[in-house]
């Protein structure tokens, strides 16, 4: 008997409408606090996360019945509110990864700073989960 998976994997991205903004990295501590607060609303694991000056990219593992859009919007709304700013965001980009290669999705998230020409190598970007778990 085959059981449905208890968890699902999601790829998410959320961009500020102002592509010249540096708000997310300027207020990285607050963004991390808002992420931790959202994580208390139910099981949530970030397999990869990169914060760029104007966008956040992630691969999340959530319970199969979780609503990733609702959780992502709560996180970004909380950040905007606590920052005391009226930030304009594009709609979040959210994809159910299903049975795709999660390792490839994680590598693509970690490559975002290179793709945006912010650094030459993913490991050079300070606001990345690529540094977690390294000795």
Image (cartoon, grey):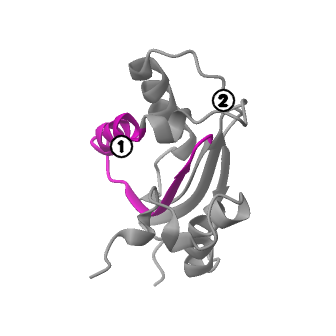
| Magenta span of residues | 28-54
Q: Residue 40 lies in what quarter of the image?
A: top left
43 vs 18, left or right, is left
Q: Residues within 10 Å of mark 1 (few under 14, many from 20)?
A: some
Task: Reply above or below: 40 against 100.
Answer: above
Residue 88 lies, in percent from the top left, at 66, 23
Residue drawn at x 62%, y 64% is 119
Residue drawn at x 50%, y 63% is 8
Residue drawn at x 64%, y 58% is 118
In the rendering, which numbered label is found on residue 89? 2
Q: Residues within 10 Å of mark 2 (few under 14, many from 20)?
A: some
Residue 129 or residue 95, whichever sits in front: 129
Disc 1 secondary structure class: helix
The answer for how far apart the CA atoms under marks 1 and 2 are is 18 Å
Residue 16 lies, in percent from the top left, at 66, 33
5 vs 99, left or right, is left
In the rendering, which numbered label is found on residue 32? 1
Disc 2 secondary structure class: loop
């Amino acid at each position: 008997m085959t059981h449905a998976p208890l968890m699902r994997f999601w790829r998410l991205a959320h961009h500020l409408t102002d592509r010249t903004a540096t708000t997310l990295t300027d207020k990285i501590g607050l963004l991390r606090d808002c992420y931790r607060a959202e994580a208390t609303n139910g099981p949530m694991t970030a397999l990869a996360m990169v914060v760029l000056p104007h966008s956040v990219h992630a691969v999340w593992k959530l319970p199969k019945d979780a609503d990733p859009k609702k959780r992502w919007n709560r996180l970004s709304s909380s950040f905007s509110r606590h920052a005391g700013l009226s930030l304009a965001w594009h709609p979040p980009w959210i994809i159910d990864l299903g049975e795709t290669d999660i390792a490839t999705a994680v590598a693509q998230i970690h490559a975002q700073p290179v793709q945006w020409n912010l650094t030459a190598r993913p490991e050079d970007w300070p606001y990345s989960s690529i540094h977690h778990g390294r000795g």
